[in-house]
Every structure is written in structure tokens, then in C-alpha cells.
Amino acid sequence: MTLKVLLQSHSSWVTAVAFSPDGKQIASGSYDETIKLWNARTGDLQKTLADGKQIASGSHDQTIKLWDTRTGDLQKTLKGHLGWVPAIVFSPDGKQIVSGSDDKTIKLWDSRIGNLQKTLIGHSDFSPNGKQIASGSGDKTIKLWDTRTGDLQQTLIGHLYGVLAIAFSPDGKQIASGSEDKTIKLWDTRAGDLQKTLVGHLGSVLALAFSLDSKQITSGSDDNTIKLWVTRTGDLQKTVASHSDSVLVVVFSPDGKQIVSGAGKTIKLWNAQIGDLQKTLTGHLGSVWDIAFSPDGKQIASVSDDQTIKLWDARIGDLQKTLTGHSGPVRAIAFSPDGKQIASGSDDETIKLWGTLSTPAGRLKKTLTSHSDWVAAIAFSLDGKQIASGSGNKTIKLWDTRTSDLQQTLTSHSIVSGSGKTIKLWDAKVSRLLGDISSSCHKFRAWREIKISQLVDSLKFFINSQYLVTNLGLIKIESPTNE
């Protein structure tokens, strides 16, 4: 390899280098507090940028701080990420900041006033017949995995930017993927062929859902709209521009007759056939993070930054009950298969089990404490006897819904002898945390390890509760070795 050009001008060590999209320029950043632009062909210095008025810093404390470069004073602290912030960049005009976090989100901020403008979130799903998992990623691809073996079957390439939403059709024949490139792509699950590209959104596609008969797709976007599409032709059936914030959640009711969407502080109920707005559900005082229908489709549960869970009548949209008890934003919600319990997960590091209206109305039944970070995902097992919870500290915990016993913890930790992360599965028979309080804690005995590299923020039980489907792939829950 021959050295072509040596670029010299910085007065301290160089910390970052990037080519321009056309390859004609190089930008370099240095500890001398300057950015320099170079001609990539000749190596000539074209410009030195040293007049920036702000510096942005990201930290393990999950915040971004804006500093005055002249005085060194702290101007603003931007809060919203739920993991450490390793990447930050200003927009070319300096009006926005983009931050990337270990919580698997990208956030856009107004650099002048510090307001959060948008949050971009990843997603995954598994096929109705249980034979495949589809995962979408910031690497612009969708990957299909064999649920039995965990093997990668196919990688679907076609999006121009990161994939933020994934959904299988109920008949299992198609996958829909939504992307930062503002498109929805339909793929054949058997051959992996791209069938159609649906164009119409003016912003990133954040949420997707198929109708029960697979004939319709609904999509939510950060252009604040919901769109209904005809699956067979890819034709746009209807655009609903009723929300005033990015649409983060779209869910079909169990009978396929309704769509519920969440954006900002509001929830909206739609007629799934014609797209007419039936009801707007207002009451939350913070952003809505998750929504779930009860198994019989009669209730809707929603959770929010306002630290509450709200239960709604799915038919008429009336608020039935507000459940309070969490001391932090509530991120995840799930109904038990029999509809008698709701599990909620929060930034306060707890999971709470509540009775629905078919049991003592909204009564807090138990609080499960063992996580040491925010609870990002919750799922009941198919028989309702277990709950799985995923946390920002990269752990999954399995709980007994009847006794509240912590049965297993799948947790990541740094490997002293090498790089990377592992999940350890622990023998619940050797030791466990009992009840819903922090009682005596003993040493756990690890009986299996799985390498991972990211936190778990979505999970579901699968195949008679023998597996967990996570955003990282399939994890088999084996029985620990008997003593």
C-alpha cells in the first residue's frame, strides 16, 4: 500500500475523519478544536472551521449537554435517551442535533431551544406459523431467521436507509418493512423477493400492521399521518392526517375491524375498512409509548410518559380507569391471555401486575422488583403462567405470575478475557429472589451463556414457552441441569 498524500495542519491529535458523499472532500476533526476541509485529490486545505458557538457532548448518564464554546458555560441538558449516548452530530445549518444511543434510538433535537423533535426506533416480528423471525436494522436490511435452528435464512436488501418497522402478514406469505427512506416494501417470505414498494409517506415509517385477512396494511410515520394500503396492488387507499405528532404505534383489533394508533399524547380509533376516525382518546399528559388490545377486543390499554396506565372501552372510546403507582414513565404493556391481568413496565425499574375490569377494578396485585434499569418490553407466556421482561441493562427476567417468584435472569456482562457481551442463564433452583420485594439474594449458578451485543427491547414467548423471540433473535429456554 502506497501513501498518496499526507495532510498536515492540525495542531493536536486528529479524532475523526470522513469523506464527503461524492468523495471529493475530506473533513477532519481535532483536539485543537477545529474542523478542516481538504481536497481529497490534491490534499490541499480548503477551509478551517473554528467559529462554532456550541459544543454538544454525550455521556453514560443518558444526556446530551450543550456548551457555550466562548465561555464554557453549560447552556442546556437534553434528556430523553434511556441508554448512554456515544454519537452526536450537528446538522449542516447547525439548527439540529442528531444523537445515537445504546437504547437503540436516534433522536433529533432543536439545537437552539433543546426540544426533542423526533425519535426513530427499530422493530422486529415473527411469522404466524412460528417458523421465521424477521428483524430490521439500521444497516438497511431485513434478516429472516429459522426459529427452530436460529440460522440466518435470508438477508433482504433494498431500503436506502435504516429499517424501523417490520410486520408479517397473518397468512405468513409477506413481510412489510418500513424505513427512514420513507417507503414500505413488501417481500415474499418464501423466496425473499421484493414484490412492491409503497411510496407516499413524507417521513420515516415508524409503525406497520396487517389486517386480519392480510388484504390491508396500515402504516404510521413521523410525517404525522396514518396510511391504509391495498396489499395486493400496493395502491394507497386512504391517508389520515389527524395526528399532530409522529405516529409510533398502530395496532389492529383482534377481529380486524378497528385500528388504534398512538402519537404524542393522543390515541385514535379508526374504522379499519374505510379509515374513518371513530374516536380520539385523550387523557394522557405525556407521550404514549405502547398500546395493547385485550384478547376479546373489548378493552384498550395504553401507557405513557405521564407514569400512568389507562384502560379504555374499545367500542365507544370511554376512559374506564387510570392506574397509578409507577414512579417513572411507563414503556411497555401486555394483557394476559385470559384478559384478567395487565403487566406494565416502567423507567422506575419495576413491573406491576394489575387486575382488569373483569377482576377487582384496576387493583394493583403485585410489584416485581429485580431489574436495575428501565423495563422496555413485557410479554406473557402462552399459558399465562410466566412473564418475560426486558430491561435497559441488557437483561431478560422470567417471572412466575402466580407467586411473583423470579425464575430466571438472562443477563449480559463484560468478558474479562475478551471483547463482546454474553447472556448467562441462571439456575433458578439454586437461588432466586422471592416475592415482590428485594428479599435475601444468594449467588446464582450460571448454566448457559449466549453472546449478545445489544440490549433486549422486545420479546415474546413462543412454542409452548420454550423460546423467547427477541430483537436479537431466538433464545431457547432450556431446563437447568438437575442437582
Image: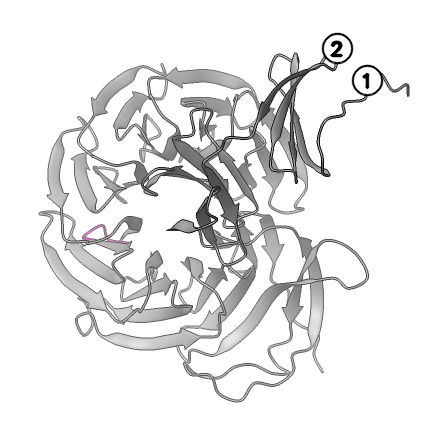
- Can residue 89 be seen in the rendering of this structure? yes
Cβ atoms under marks 2 and 1 closer than 8 Å? yes
Q: Quadrant of residue 120?
A: top left
Left or right of 418 on screen, residue 400: left
Along the viewing direction, whichever of 349 and 427 lies nearer the viewer: 349
The quadrant where residue 151 appears:
top right
Q: CA distance from mark 2 to mark 1?
A: 7 Å
Q: Amino acid at mark 2?
A: Thr
Label 2 Cα crowd, 10 Å radius (few <14 / some 14-19 / many 20+): few
**Secondary structure beneath label 2:** loop
Q: Which residues are magenta?
A: 295-299
Which residue is found at the position 20% from the left and 26% from the top? 240
Question: What residue is disc 1 on?
Answer: 5
Going by the numbered disc 1, the residue's amino acid type is Val
What residue lies at 39% left-to-right and 18% top-to-bottom? 198
* Horizontal side of residue 471 vs 327, given as left or right: right
Q: Give x and y (percent) for residue 442.
A: 61, 85
Q: Residue at x 47, y 28 (%)?
A: 173
In the rendered image, residue 155, in percent from the top left (x then y), is placed at 62, 29
Name the image quarter holding the C terminus: bottom right
**Of callouts 2 and 1, the N-terminal one:** 1
- Which is nearer the eye, 455 or 318? 455
Q: Which residue is farthest front?
A: 71
Picture coordinates of residue 161 (x, y %)?
A: 51, 25
Lateral position of residue 132 relative to residue 259, left or right:
right
Is disc 1 placed on a helix, strand or loop? loop
Q: What residue is drawn where x is 42% and y is 64%?
A: 383
For label 2, the residue is 42
